[in-house]
């Protein structure tokens, strides 16, 4: 991200963000409520464009190309940079179709059974559902539904997976499963996660970006670095206050 500002109408929600994401690492975005975490993560695949009144200035470079250039297709951007949401949102269709549908829309011509199996395996869900692929996805538990959403995202072969509070609707055991899965996926994918949960950021991420709210209510990035450094030797007083629980 280069000099990124995001406005909702006249309100500047995010101010002057410069952030370089590392490939095949997990980057956590943390900070108090309203500091713009969701707004920032949505910039990485042009999801803010779907919000009426939202506007971005600056650049988001992916392989050196600004994804906001007029000749870039947002649908293609969202295929390469997939997103998993707070609440698991499988389609009200079978487990199999949840994966096959997106792949088909994206023009997948290979063996669909293989793709479904491979995606479910990568999302650590295969063993639990392999005998029930034609069951409705909504009959799965919340944690299984979220892994299915991750499988669906992986099936279209993205390079980056964005996750906005992916565990906030899950119990602690399902949360740990998703965290283990994220570590597995980070071998092949670049992951960016928004989380309210600082322990989660400390457990799973390689890099952490701490955001806060400036005097004009705009979100700003205070500090970014290796997670270990941010949590043990923050350079900025505001980061220290937040991670030690004095603020937010
Ligand atoms: N669709 C919208 N229209 C107008 N203002 C918005 C919209 N979405 C977010 N905002 C405002 O932008 C700012 C940043 O919101 P955002 O949801 O990105 O913060 P956040 O850090 O993700 O918050 P939380 O941790 O509470 O989810 C807030 O002041 C919020 O009120």
Image (spheres, grey):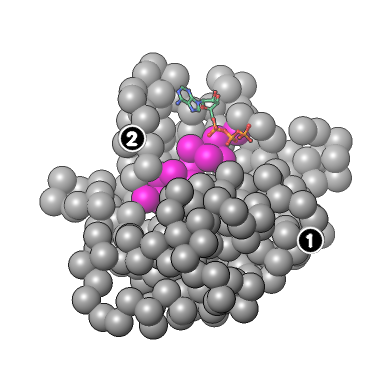
Check disc 2 and report its element: helix, strand or loop. helix
Point out the tag, 2 or 1, that comes first from the N-terminus. Answer: 2
Q: Locate residue 28 relative to residue 45 in the image: left or right.
A: right
- Residue drawn at the location 68% of the way across and 46% of the way down: 168
Query: Can residue 128 be seen in the rendering of this structure?
Result: yes
Quadrant hosting ligand 1: top right
Q: Residues within 10 Å of mark 2 (few under 14, many from 20)?
A: few
Q: Looking at the rendered structure, which numbered label has been put on residue 50?
A: 2
Q: Is residue 28 above or below residue 23?
A: above
Q: Position of residue 146 (x, y in %)?
A: 58, 56
Does the magenta run of residues contain 43? Answer: yes
Q: Locate residue 124 relative to residue 79 in the image: left or right.
A: right
Q: Is mark 1 within 8 Å of ligand 1?
A: no
Check disc 1 and report its element: helix, strand or loop. helix
Q: Is residue 94 above or below residue 221?
A: below
Span highlighted in magenta in the image? 35-45
Q: Position of residue 24 (x, y in %)?
A: 51, 73
- Residue drawn at the location 86% of the way across and 45% of the way down: 244
- Looking at the image, which is closer to me, 193 or 240? 193
Q: Looking at the rendered structure, which numbered label has been put on residue 173?
A: 1
- Residue drawn at the location 77% of the way across and 52% of the way down: 171
């Amino acid at each position: 991200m280069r000099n990124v500002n995001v406005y909702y109408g006249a309100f500047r929600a995010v101010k002057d963000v410069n952030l370089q994401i590392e490939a095949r690492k997990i980057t956590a975005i943390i900070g108090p409520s309203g500091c713009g975490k969701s707004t920032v993560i949505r910039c990485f695949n042009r999801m803010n464009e779907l919000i009426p009144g939202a506007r971005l200035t600056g650049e988001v470079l992916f392989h050196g190309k600004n994804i906001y250039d007029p000749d870039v297709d947002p649908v293609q951007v969202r295929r390469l940079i997939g997103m998993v949401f707070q609440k698991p949102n499988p389609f009200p269709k079978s487990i199999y179709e949840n994966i096959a549908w997106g792949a088909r829309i994206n023009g997948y011509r290979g063996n669909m059974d293989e793709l479904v199996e491979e995606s479910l395996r990568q999302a650590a869900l295969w063993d639990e559902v392999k005998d029930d692929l034609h069951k409705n996805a909504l009959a799965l538990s919340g944690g299984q539904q979220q892994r299915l959403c991750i499988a669906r995202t992986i099936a279209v072969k993205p390079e980056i997976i964005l996750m906005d509070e992916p565990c906030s609707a899950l119990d602690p055991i399902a949360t740990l499963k998703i965290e283990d899965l994220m570590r597995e996926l980070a071998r092949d994918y670049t992951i960016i996660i928004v989380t309210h949960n600082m322990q989660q950021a400390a457990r799973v991420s390689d890099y952490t970006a701490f955001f806060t709210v400036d005097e004009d209510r705009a979100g700003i990035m205070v500090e970014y670095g290796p997670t270990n450094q941010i949590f043990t030797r923050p350079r900025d007083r505001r980061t220290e206050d937040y991670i030690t629980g004095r603020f937010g």
